[in-house]
Amino acid sequence: MRVIGIEGTAWNLSIAIVDEKDVIAEAEAVYIPKHGGIHPREAAQHHAAEIKNVLTKVLSAAAERGVTPHDIDGVAFSQGPGMGPCLRVVATAARTLSLKLKVPLVGVNHCVAHVEVGRWRCGAEDPVTLYVSGANSQVLAYRGGRYRILGETLDIGIGNALDKFARFLGLSHPGGPKIEELARRGREYVPLPYVVKGMDFSFSGLETAAEKAVNDGRSVEDVCFSFQETAFAMLTEVTERAVAHCEKDEVLLAGGVGANGRLQEMLRTMCEERGAKFYVPEARFLKDNGAMIAYLGLLMLKSGVRTPIDASAVKPNFRPEEVEVTWR
Ligand code: AMP
Ligand code: MG
């Protein structure tokens, strides 16, 4: 089976064709805000302007590998969660493509796609997943036929907090990699609010306190270092508790912030101490990508799931628990 998948929940418009074994073709167009953070309407306009181009690229890359549009058995799209205007561009294109190719349509949950692509690429069986991106920060595990959120952010995603702090420092979007670079040169820990409530965490107060520390004269490098140490320790603590409670022995990292070397190091240490296996997919499968949407679509279609056009409306607040896992 071959499935084409369209991702475009936020900054990355990405389309890929996959089969059970591998990614056949992939193309993307990245929206970079001129100033400030991601603007939903501007991002949607970017996606609308680029989608024909990205689709043409992916189809010609597939053709080079002997795969034509007639060989495509289904169309998958990220139905949510994400920015409404962006999701609508993606859904419209997916419906059109499904009608044109006369193949079934399937709407997939973006968070579940992050988990499944990680399991696929790393060979993890039943991990606790830490999914950390711009908008989302969640700890997920499979229980009772669904992916349950065991812990999540009470306010903004960790990526958003990093991007916001970077903006305050005058750095351009995305800020995460720039903060990571600065943090390497930090020496002294500046106390910042460590907020874990039960299994949930919060980053908004931490970000405000980091701005205040810089205004109070602490070095930017020290504050970046302390920001990472505090936020990543919170995420590692909750992930560890999830592993213990669920009696799992695998941890999977997902989402763009997963590219961070210090976060990986903390999680790896925690896993070593517990005798758990730690999995990190290649960077191109960590960040938002079309392949994960195509792959989850393939799993869902194979298990008999279809999304009729009249049920294909976008779901900006789509939660992973809403999806019945029919493919495991
Ligand atoms: P995603 O939405 O999953 O594609 O992830 C995007 C987020 O990942 C943005 O907030 C980036 O700032 C963040 N990010 C990317 N690379 C890194 C890194 N090396 N360290 C921390 N955050 C990162
Ligand atoms: Mg994501």
Image: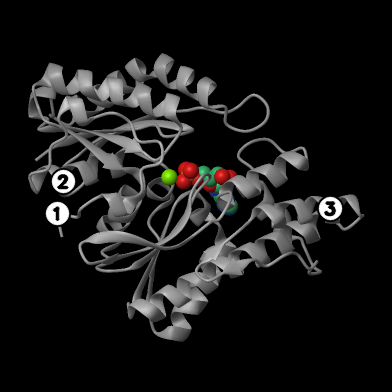
**Callout 1: few (<14), some (14-19), or many (20+) C-alpha neighbours within 10 Å?**
some
Q: Quadrant of the N terminus?
A: top left
Task: Assess whether mark 3 and mark 2 are in contact (beta carbons under 8 angstroms).
Answer: no
Q: Nearer the viewer, residue 328 or 276?
A: 328
Q: What residue lies at 63% left-to-right and 56% top-to-bottom?
A: 203
Task: Assess whether mark 1 and mark 3 are in contact (beta carbons under 8 angstroms).
Answer: no
Q: Which residue is mark 3?
A: 212
Earlier residue among tags 3 and 1: 3
Q: Which residue is mark 1?
A: 326
Q: Quick check: 93 left or right of 182?
A: left
Q: Secondary structure at mark 1?
A: loop
Viewer-side label of 2, 1 = 1
**Callout 2: few (<14), some (14-19), or many (20+) C-alpha neighbours within 10 Å?**
many
Q: Which residue is mark 2?
A: 300
Residue 213 position within the rendered picture, expressed as x and y whole percent measured from the top left? 84, 56
Earlier residue among tags 2 and 3: 3
Task: Assess whether mark 1 and mark 2 are in contact (beta carbons under 8 angstroms).
Answer: yes
